[in-house]
């Protein structure tokens, strides 16, 4: 039976998710939307939109133009990084709030916000390390893939986009292990940290002890989770592409490097992307809720010591009672 834990966890996760969204409770759905916003469910494209002229070392301008342009870009990037750092901190805290909200009977967010800030800061440290690793992988992809392609046809402007495509494909392959590590940390280490009130490193040691001899189950879980995520992303991408076309915007706008800085900053360009973000948030909130329930049910099936869902705890207590009074 243990060979099918990842599949068995799907049905209870669906049941829990339906219970959260039906019958519709506006207050509960608004809270889930807020949580989903902070954990990033609204982000439809994680790749920054850069154009040829926005990359300082590819600019053909010289002298003061390069200096002024570089200074302006550095200032803007610094401001964006500070904003993203603040968002990343709240996102880390809300990963714990999400588990608290789904696993308890409470209908409040603020109590968990104050209680989980310390754990959120620890999780933020992990995310910063993963971002640094992704940055190193991006540098490797640029130096080993993009630069050779650019050097082979230096006079062909179209080769920039070919090099970008190859570099992004190489980066995707390089970061797959980091992606899996992040999934395991978010789905399992966060609940373990809540149960044991511990840090990430100890949480990993505890989880490794629990899944010893169950690597096949973890592999099946990751395949199902990644498969569902990719399938949802494809469906959402088609929906958003249809929306863009319906609003009269070219799909080329969604491809990094094909939009100028002036176009990005224009109101006519920003509004469709804000609408896309809102639609992504609404569509993805039930999906991320289901996936988090799936993780919690799967963790319970791995070890009842980490059962955070009330119904699963009650089920275990009934089983213990029946065994105790069984003649």
Image (tube, rainbow, N blue to C red):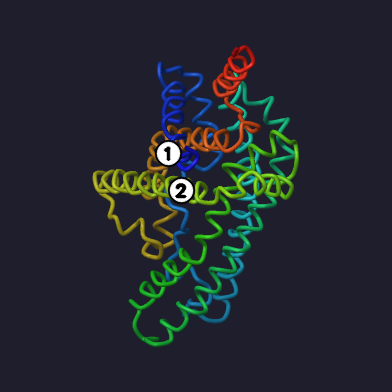
Residue 309, quarter of picture? top right
Residue that sits furthest to the front in the current view = 327
Percent from the top left, x then y, of residue 193?
69, 39
Look at the image and tell me whether residue 107 can be seen. no
Q: Is residue 69 above or below residue 103?
A: below
Percent from the top left, x then y, of residue 220?
46, 48
- Left or right, 28 with respect to 156, comes to right
Mark 2 packing: few (<14 Cα in 10 Å), some, or many (20+)?
some
Image point (37%, 72%), residue name: 161
Which residue is the site of mark 2?
Answer: 220
Image point (60%, 38%), residue name: 95
Image point (72%, 40%), residue name: 119
Q: Earlier in the sequence, mark 2 or mark 1?
A: 1
Look at the image and tell me whether residue 317 can be seen. yes
Q: Are marks 2 and 1 in contact (CB under 8 Å)?
A: yes
Percent from the top left, x then y, of residue 84?
60, 50
For residue 7, the mark is 1
């Amino acid at each position: 039976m243990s060979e099918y834990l990842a599949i068995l966890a799907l049905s209870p996760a669906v049941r829990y998710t339906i219970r959260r969204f039906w019958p519709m409770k506006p207050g509960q759905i608004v809270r889930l939307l807020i949580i989903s916003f902070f954990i990033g469910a609204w982000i439809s494209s994680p790749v920054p939109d850069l154009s040829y002229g926005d990359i300082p070392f590819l600019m053909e301008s010289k002298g003061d133009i390069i200096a002024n342009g570089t200074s302006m870009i550095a200032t803007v990037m610094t401001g964006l990084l500070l904003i993203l750092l603040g968002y990343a901190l709240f996102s880390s805290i809300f990963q714990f709030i999400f588990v608290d909200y789904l696993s308890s009977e409470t209908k409040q967010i603020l109590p968990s916000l104050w209680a989980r800030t310390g754990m959120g800061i620890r999780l933020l440290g992990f995310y910063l390390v993963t971002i640094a690793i992704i940055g190193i992988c991006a540098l490797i992809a640029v130096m080993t893939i993009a630069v050779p392609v650019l050097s082979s046809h230096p006079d062909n402007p179209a080769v920039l986009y070919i090099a970008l495509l190859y570099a992004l494909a190489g980066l995707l392959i390089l970061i797959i292990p980091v992606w899996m590590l992040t999934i395991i940390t978010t789905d399992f280490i966060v609940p373990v940290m809540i149960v044991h009130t511990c840090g990430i490193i100890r949480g990993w040691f505890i989880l490794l002890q629990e899944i010893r001899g169950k690597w096949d189950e973890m592999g099946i879980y990751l395949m199902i989770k990644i498969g569902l995520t990719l399938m949802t992303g494809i469906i959402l991408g088609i929906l958003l592409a249809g929306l863009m076309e319906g609003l009269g915007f070219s799909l080329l706008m969604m491809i990094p490097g094909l939009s100028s800085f002036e176009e990005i900053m224009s109101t006519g360009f920003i509004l469709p992307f804000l609408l896309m973000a809102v639609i992504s948030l609404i569509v993805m909130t039930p999906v991320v809720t289901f996936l988090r329930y799936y993780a919690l049910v799967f963790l319970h099936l791995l070890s009842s010591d980490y059962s955070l869902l009330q119904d699963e705890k009650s089920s275990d207590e009934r089983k213990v009672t029946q065994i105790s009074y069984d003649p």
